Image (spheres, rainbow, N blue to C red):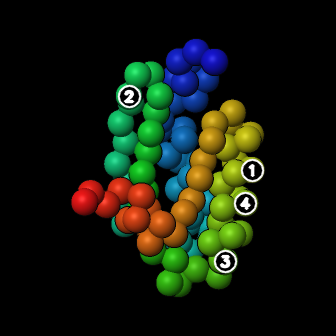
Amino acid sequence: TGDWSSDVCSSDLIAAVSQIMAENKVNILTINQVILDGIFNMAMIVDMDNSDITLDTLQDLLKQKGDALGVEIRAQNQAIFDAMHRVG
């Protein structure tokens, strides 16, 4: 597939995801991003307490945006993320 940056720049991706969050009252708490071996990875921690949508709906919206941009965007529950990244 080549270098992701030739198709989508990180600021465009952040803007697209941030727009979805704002439109659905999802508060962005932190954003971390890194490029490893030419693969862009972004982790965003959000607060959905005041949102009108469910996690399932947010996942669908992000998947649709990712498909349109030619990238994979996933959202998961904090508990799943914590379990996957716990050491020991």
Is residue 79 found left or right of 76 in the rendered image? left
Observer-nearest residue: 65 or 83? 83
Is residue 82 found left or right of 8 in the rendered image? left
Would you say the residues marked 1 and 4 are in contact, meaning their CB atoms lie under 8 Å apart? yes
Q: Which mark is residue 53?
A: 3
Disc 2: which residue:
36
Question: How far, Cα to Cα, is label 2 from label 4?
Answer: 26 Å
State the quadrant of the C terminus: bottom left
Looking at the image, is 14 positioned above or below residue 37?
A: below
Q: Which mark is residue 60?
A: 4
Q: Amino acid at mark 4?
A: Asp
* Outermost front residue: 88
Question: How far, Cα to Cα, is label 1 from label 4?
Answer: 6 Å
Q: Helix or strand or loop: what does disc 2 sit on?
A: strand
Disc 1: which residue:
64
Observer-nearest residue: 3 or 88? 88
Q: Position of residue 14 (x, y in %)?
A: 50, 46
Question: How far, Cα to Cα, is label 1 from label 2?
Answer: 24 Å
Mark 1 or mark 2, which has the lower sequence index? Answer: 2
Would you say the residues marked 3 and 2 are in contact, meaning their CB atoms lie under 8 Å apart? no
Looking at the image, is 1 positioned above or below residue 71?
A: above
Mark 1 is surrounded, within 10 Å at the Cα level, by few (under 14), some (14 to 19) or many (20 or more) other residues, namely some
Q: Helix or strand or loop: what does disc 1 sit on?
A: helix
